Amino acid sequence: MTTAVSRKASHSMALVALFAALMAVMGLIPKIDLPLGVPITLQSLGVMLAGCLLGARRGFQALLLFLAAVAAGLPLLAGGRGGLGVFMAPSAGYLVGYALAAGVTGALMRLLPQATPLRTAVSAFIASALGGLVFLHAMGIAGLVLLAQMPLDKAFMADLVFVPGDLIKCVLCAVVVHTVAKALPDWQFGGRER
């Protein structure tokens, strides 16, 4: 029994570390800078994937580990950014929201139907759209209001520039989940026990 617990804990830690590393790799893809101080990056796709594939708890832990490494000064964000200063920039709301959004996405994924690979993919799109887009964007807007001193209506309008790209990321997340569901039918999407 101790071996089974150890194996499960080791597997969980490996997945958390793997997804933190995946977020770091996504940071190597160049960012697109916008005038409002928040760049367009691929890393929000990592948030969606962590929630859908790992579930709320492990997805949250993976992104928390990633953010801890960024706070420690590792240049893991797109454009080679890192350190405590990034948590004071206009994009800080999005960064702080990464771990929470992965948790929300994972919790939603766990609740949605997963009977077939296609249903699992549709559920991943919905979970990503609600957790990785709506929730994450709400955190980002709050950051723009608090840190950039932007009025709420202007912060909301500025945030809209990210929506089309993030909808594409939701589709990409659903495609990845569909592929995993077909190849690994026993995968526990959203941390769901089978």
Image: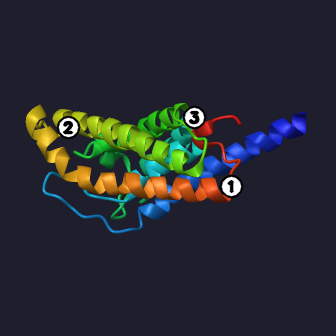
| SS at circle 3 | helix
Residue at image point 33% right, 57% down? 168
Q: Which mark is residue 57?
A: 3
Q: Between disc 1 and disc 3, whose residue precedes?
A: 3
Drawn side of residue 99 relative to residue 110, left or right: left
Residue at mark 2 to residue at mark 1: CA–CA distance: 43 Å
Residue density around tag 3, few if under 14, some if 14–19, many if 20 or more, within 10 Å: many
Viewer-nearest residue: 162 or 177: 177
Q: Between disc 2 and disc 3, whose residue precedes?
A: 3
| SS at circle 1 | loop
Drawn side of residue 82 relative to residue 117, left or right: left
**Residue on which disc 1 sits:** 184
Q: Which mark is residue 147?
A: 2
Residue at mark 2 to residue at mark 3: CA–CA distance: 28 Å
Viewer-nearest residue: 107 or 175: 175
Residue at mark 1 to residue at mark 3: CA–CA distance: 21 Å
Q: Between disc 2 and disc 1, whose residue precedes?
A: 2
**Looking at the picture, how far across and down is residue 112, in whole percent?**
51, 34
- Residue 42 visible? The answer is yes
Drawn side of residue 104 relative to residue 117, left or right: left
Badge 2 vs badge 3, beta-carbon distance below 8 Å: no
Give the image's coloring scheme: rainbow
Residue 182 placement: quadrant: bottom right
